[in-house]
Amino acid sequence: MPQPRRSQQSATLERHWHRFQQLKRELERLEYFCKGTVLKRLMKCGKAQCACRRDPAKRHGPYFEWTYKEKGKTVNVKLTPETAPLYRVASQQYRKLKALLHRLERLSLTGLRAQAKRAQSKRTA
Ligand SMILES: [Zn+2]
């Protein structure tokens, strides 16, 4: 009865491989990416007479900042309202990349296990 089992194994291998190829195509559609996040900040200036002191709606800004970690240190990069959206989109692309890589890795392990099982059963058949 090894025949039906073997074809089922092949179908499983093929399915994993097909899904793997699909995910790789998603990688190709990735745009420029950057790690970290883009923050939008409203600031108090510290002047005693300024309205920003009491009214949160009168705070200054918005100011945009791109922050990320480099060798354990947080790096802050000032952005303008014009450039902030670029970095925001890029940071979303980075999260997409990480998610894709995670899925590719899991799929690789599943595929590898299936291949290993088949290689083993070939030997003992
Ligand atoms: Zn102020």
Image (cartoon, rainbow, N blue to C red):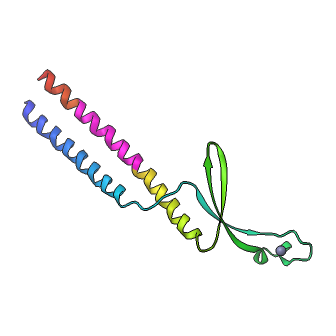
**Pick the front one: 59 or 29:** 29
Q: Determine the residue located farthest toward the right in the rendered image.
A: 48
Residue in view at x 42 percent, y 62 percent: 31
Q: Is residue 77 left or right of residue 108?
A: right
Asked if residue 20 is among those painted magenta in the image, a careful observer would answer: no
Q: Quick check: 53 above or below 4?
A: below
**Pick the front one: 73 or 1:** 73
Residue 110 rendering spot, x and y as whole percentages: 30, 39
Image quarter for residue 53? bottom right
Q: Determine the residue located farthest toward the top in the rendered image.
A: 124
Image quarter for residue 63? bottom right
Asked if residue 109 is among those painted magenta in the image, a careful observer would answer: yes
Q: Which image quarter holds the N terminus? A: top left
Quadrant holding ligand 1?
bottom right
Q: Quick check: 96 above or below 112?
A: below
Residue in view at x 64 percent, y 71 percent: 80
Give the residues drawn in magenta, as a range: 101-116
Residue 70 rendering spot, x and y as whole percentages: 61, 47
Residue 7 rendering spot, x and y as whole percentages: 11, 39
Q: Is residue 97 left or right of residue 56?
A: left
